[in-house]
Amino acid sequence: MKTLLNSKIKIEDEGQKMKKIINQPADIVTEMVSGLTRAYPDFIKRLDGTNVIVKTEQASQVQLISGGGSGHEPSHAGFVGEGMLSAAVCGEVFTSPTPDQIYEAAKAVDTGAGIFFIIKNYSGDVMNFDMAKDMAEMADIQVDFVIVDDDIAVENSTYTQGKRGVAGTVLVHKILGNLARSGASLIEIKKAAEVLVPEIHTIAVALSGATVPEVGKPGFELPEDEIEYGVGIHGEPGYRREKMLPSKDLAKELVDKLVLSFDGDTTSHYAILVNGMGASPLMEQFIFTNDVMDLLDDKGVKVAYSKVGNLMTSIDMAGISLTLLRLSNADWLEGLNADVKTIAWG
């Protein structure tokens, strides 16, 4: 209690206000990882001296590793387990994990079939995973990777050259995880990933910014009656602000943009992911999903799979993202429907 009170007083003394169930802001990731692994010891364990989370048991297969800055929970640690990731590397809040921690993850899970990195397209993530790849290969561990860039909102943004990697990354975990479990080789997984990623498109709308605990205030502020389309998962700028609208109007903006990004293709089958950004309740997510389904029905788009929930969050940002995956390969739908044993997929 004393620690919480001192943290709150310090922040308010700086002219900021923040309410978080934490101790010291600097200890957030370490304590979060500790709590996560202690809560689910049948699924995951922590590598000593690191913020790396690995499966309790590793099968003899290609091992998938992902990660990034913390604050996006349950991504990526919540998807470590049978049928998805073999390990997740938790960086500091909104900060890329270090190469040495990624390398430790690779060493810990390698069974000889190779390692496949799933990397969101942010400059720090790409650079540090690439350095870890070099370190692993020097230790005779085979490594390949894919860079996920599913956010169609803007072409270049803060921390990014090209499109950002956002919630669609979770679908990559799921589909490639099933492929790896089936015994696919590192080369086969690489080829599948290169075809899969371009077929995943995402766009978001924010109602409020996210508060990084060590900063103590939102990364951006919106007036009470405004929203912003196209924000990134770290609060990067979007493409337009306007007055708050009903869910069906927000859904129309996102659906129209996404269908257009597939060259207006309404004849293919799609999977959809409605993802909460952290502070928007499931009630609102399901209302939004209902509106999305109506709009896709009106366009004649066939939805073969749907998933709703908080899968790639942005701490306490209020908002939602919508992902469409064009199912141009039947194996992808099989992968999405496959049973897994992880904390967060369900």
Image (cartoon, helix red, strand yellow):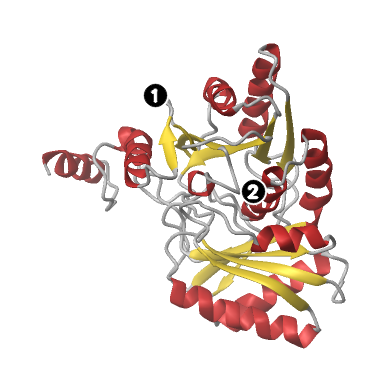
CA neighbours of label 1 inside 10 A, class few (<14), some (14 to 19), many (20+): few
Vertically, is 221 above or below 272? Answer: above
In this rendered view, identify the residue nearer to me: 66 or 40: 40
Question: Is 235 displayed left or right of 122 in the figure?
Answer: left
Where is mark 1, residue-wise? 48
Res 323 quadrant in image: bottom right
SS at mark 1 in the image: loop
Mark positioned earlier in the residue sequence (1 or 2): 1
x, y (%) of residue 329?
83, 60
Vertically, is 78 above or below 301? Answer: above
Task: Name which residue type carries label 2.
Answer: His
Quarter in which the N terminus is drawn: top left
SS at mark 2 in the image: helix
Instruction: Give residue 173's mark.
Output: 2
In this rendered view, identify the residue nearer to me: 107 or 3: 107
Task: Name which residue type carries label 1.
Answer: Asp
Q: Which residue is outermost to the left?
A: 2
Count the marks: how many?
2
The answer to whether the residue labelled 1 contacts the one labelled 2, judged by CB atoms less than 8 Å apart, is: no
